[in-house]
Each structure stands twice: as C-alpha cells, then as structure tokens.
Image (spheres, rainbow, N blue to C red):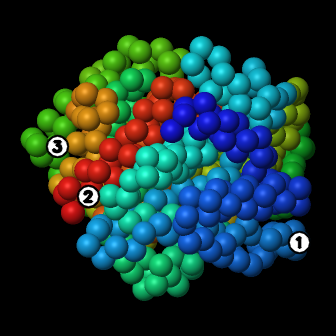
Amino acid sequence: MDPKLGRMTLKEWVAIESDSVQPVPRFRQELFRMMAMAADMLQRLGARVALVDMGPQQLPDGQTLPIPPVILAELGSDPTKGTVCFYGHLDVQPADRGDGWLTDPYVLTEVDGKLYGRGATDNKGPVLAWINAVSAFRALKQDLPVNIKFIIEGMEEAGSVALEELVEKEKDRFFSGVDYIVISDNLWISQRKPAITYGTRGNSYFMVEVKCRDQDFHSGTFGGILHEPMADLVALLGSLVDSSGHILVPGIYDEVVPLTEEEINTYKAIHLDLEEYRNSSRVEKFLFDTKEEILMHLWRYPSLSIHGIEGAFDEPGAKTVIPGRVIGKFSVRLVPHMNVSVVEKQVTRHLEDVFSKRNSSNKMVVSMALGLHPWIANINDTQYLAAKRAIRTVFGTEPDMIRDGSTIPIAKMFQEIVHKSVVLIPLGAVDDGEHSQNEKINRWNYIEGTKLFAAFFLEMAQLH
C-alpha cells in the first residue's frame, strides 16, 4: 500500500465531524455519512457488507435521534482458515478549534511526522490501518491468510448505544464462525515500544445525595442552626479514601486477586521511564516511587476517585449560600475478581454507617449510576502468541504486556456473550492525546501499525 494513499483516506475520514457525544441532528447526519463511506470502502475490497439499522435513541429531554448503523462485514469463508473479527468505532469526542487546538481538529495536519486531527488515533487511524492491511493482500493479488470479519460502530463514545443487544442477537449468526476478536482502541505505555493489552479495570460510578430542602439557604440567616448538607457530604467523601490512595471502605480489597512472583516479573519487564512519565503528566510527585508499584496501582489494584459535587456554588466570586441539596460523585475502578453488586453493597453500607454517626437530620441517598466489570484475558491464547510474533517481525522487539487502568466495556462484552478470546493490539503512542486537544497519531505508528496487522494475519494463519 502506498502510505500516501492511506494518509489521504485518513484525511477524508478525519474531515467528517462524526461526534456521537453531542445529540445534535447535524452530527448524526455526519455519523451516517461516515458509516456509509466506510461500508463503501469495504465493499470495494470485495467484502460482503451489511449496514444494520439500530433504530432510534431516546434522549432524556424526550427527543429522539437515529442511531447510526453498525457495519457487519465479511471477507472470506474458507473453513480451513481461522476467522479473526476486528472491532472498531468511527465516532469521535467533541472537538472545537477554540478549545485549545493548535490546528483545525477536522483537518488532518502533519507536523514533524505527527498527524493531528480528531479521531486520528481514536479510532479512525487504527480502523483504517486494519483495512489497509487487508487491501495490501488484495493489491498483491494474494489470498488473505485468514477469514476477516468487521464489526464497526458509530456510538462508542456515547456508550455503544444498543450494541450489546446486536451482539447478543448475532452471536449464533455473524459471530458463529469467529475464532478470535481483535480490538485496537487504546495506547501503548511508551512513545516507541509497542504493547499488547490483556486486561482492563472495571468501573462502578456512584452518586451520594444529601438533602435538607430543594432551596438554598442564606448563611447569615441560617448558618449555625442547620445540619448543612455540604458539611455532611464533605465528611462522607472524606471517609472514602486516605492520603496514600488506600480505599477505606471495609471489605473492598477482599476479592482482589493475590499478587504472585510471576506477575511482579511482568511489571519488571515493562519499559517505563518514570521521570519521563512524570514530566509528560506534569505531576510533581506520584504516590509511589517505583515503576512496579505505579503499574500495579494503575492496573491490578482498585482505586477510588472523587469527581465533583453537583449543587455546590462553584462560580467565581463570593456568594454566602448554604446549598440545600448536594450530590457527590465518585467512582471505584474495579479489578479481578471484584464484583459490581458486592462493591455497591459495601460502599452503600460504609456511607450509611458514616452518615448515621453524624446524627444529621438531612436525608442521604446512595445510588450506583454505572457498573462495569473488569476484563482479563489468558496471555497464552493463540492470538496473543501471534501478536507477539508479529510485533517481533515488524518492530524487532518484544512487546510490553500491559493492562489498561481505564475501562473498555466492549472487551468484556465480547468475552461474555460471544465466548471468544479477545486481544487489544494498540497502535498509538502514549502521548497521542485521545479525547483531548491536539489528538494525533504518528505517521510511523500508522504505517508500522498497518504492517503489524498484515504480519498478524500471517502469524494467525500459521498458529491456527
């Protein structure tokens, strides 16, 4: 494949403002255009393509918007070959030049070998790299070493609306012949060394509401004679985690998988320059001093983060208000073998105990808004061995075997519904800035990533 052609297509794809987060008709039209363009490209490669109608999305304000179709595509059906299914998404996070972008986010711009644009690394670049790898075999008039399937959606950034139902419906049809599932929707842990991801943390997102009344109070008129909701809430939030990052909820570490010597060695083998990591993060000091401790607390131990307070006064200036009702928001990142419903009970019980000791006349309600389980794979599965061999071939190095501290629900969903091995093969460097201003993919990562996928097909054929 001519690298310039691949870059031209990426330029066309980045130019489409396929924002799924903002529920606006114009962006939905762009999403439909994006999915149609990708489907057309796959058809021209010779794939059998179905654009699956996903119906309408009901929004909280009562309006409905159409959900963009999901692409289900197939290339090859040779029963003697393995079948690899690639998942990707073509929707993006919102982006606006005025938010601090140095270039127009919807014009792919190359600066010093970096291709800047919204979706360049998350996830239009990796999807195109996979398609480019397929088209390389076509251009050379060579048979594909494996059968390839694609499932490509346009609502990942908005929570993959209605996708789970489709996967459930198709598990005995589209997915019936699939042997392995590949996702490329995360990043390396370094700037130059490739990685394979075999696990992600889950997430339980909580709201704790403390209410005296719906109206706010004047602190001059009521200060000193009330149980103030904000004081109660600050005490509740302050009871969740200590200054060393240790979660104070009783029992929450009980189901965390014990640490083994073998696992410690995997962290030792990972390339991570702590000084570079700290500088690029613009953080003066982390909670831990060693690479191994940092990685373990990002990947294999749970964490609790406090995100914000709804209903509090947060504008500039001085306003002497006592909020009548406040909602604290926090989340727990879960690791194997923590269970969402058990964590919900533990957190709720802990907050109820702390609140009861305050003897407050206010009302407290705890709710879990989101519960996503952690995901972990067996790194001895065939496709992990194939991915390692492909990385050695293309990059001349062993990959970092990493986990991701964030949550990629789609990996767990595929594993639980389709019951197939899932691997994450990231292409982007650690500094690609997915979701933030000046998102980019390095030209080198994009081209070498395309080669990596082609090598992966060949390795899968040999191992299968």
Q: Tell me, yes or no, whether the two marked residues, 3 and 2, touch with CB atoms within 8 Å.
A: no
* Disc on res. 461: 2
- Residue drawn at x 81%, y 34% is 96
- Residue drawn at x 73%, y 41% is 12
* Disc on res. 99: none
Q: Name the residue type under label 1.
A: Gln
Of the numbered discs 1 and 3, the one sitting upstream in the chain is 1
Q: State the residue position of label 3.
A: 263
| Label 1: element kind | loop
Q: State the residue position of label 1.
A: 63
Task: Give the percent coordinates (x, y) of residue 223.
Answer: 80, 42
Task: Give the percent coordinates (x, y) of residue 81.
Answer: 29, 68
Give the spatial CA distance, label 3 vs label 2: 30 Å
**Extreme residue toward the left, this view:** 261
Q: Is residue 209 left or right of residue 123?
A: right
In the rendered image, the vertical position of residue 88 relative to residue 446, given as above or below: below
In the rendered image, the vertical position of residue 66 relative to residue 218, given as above or below: below
Task: Give the percent coordinates (x, y) of residue 335.
Answer: 34, 54
Q: Residues within 10 Å of mark 1 (few under 14, many from 20)?
A: few
- The quadrant in which residue 322 appears is top right
Judge by depth and name the residue closer to the eye, 296 or 394.
394
| Label 3: element kind | helix
Look at discs 3 and 2 and give the one toward the viewer: 2
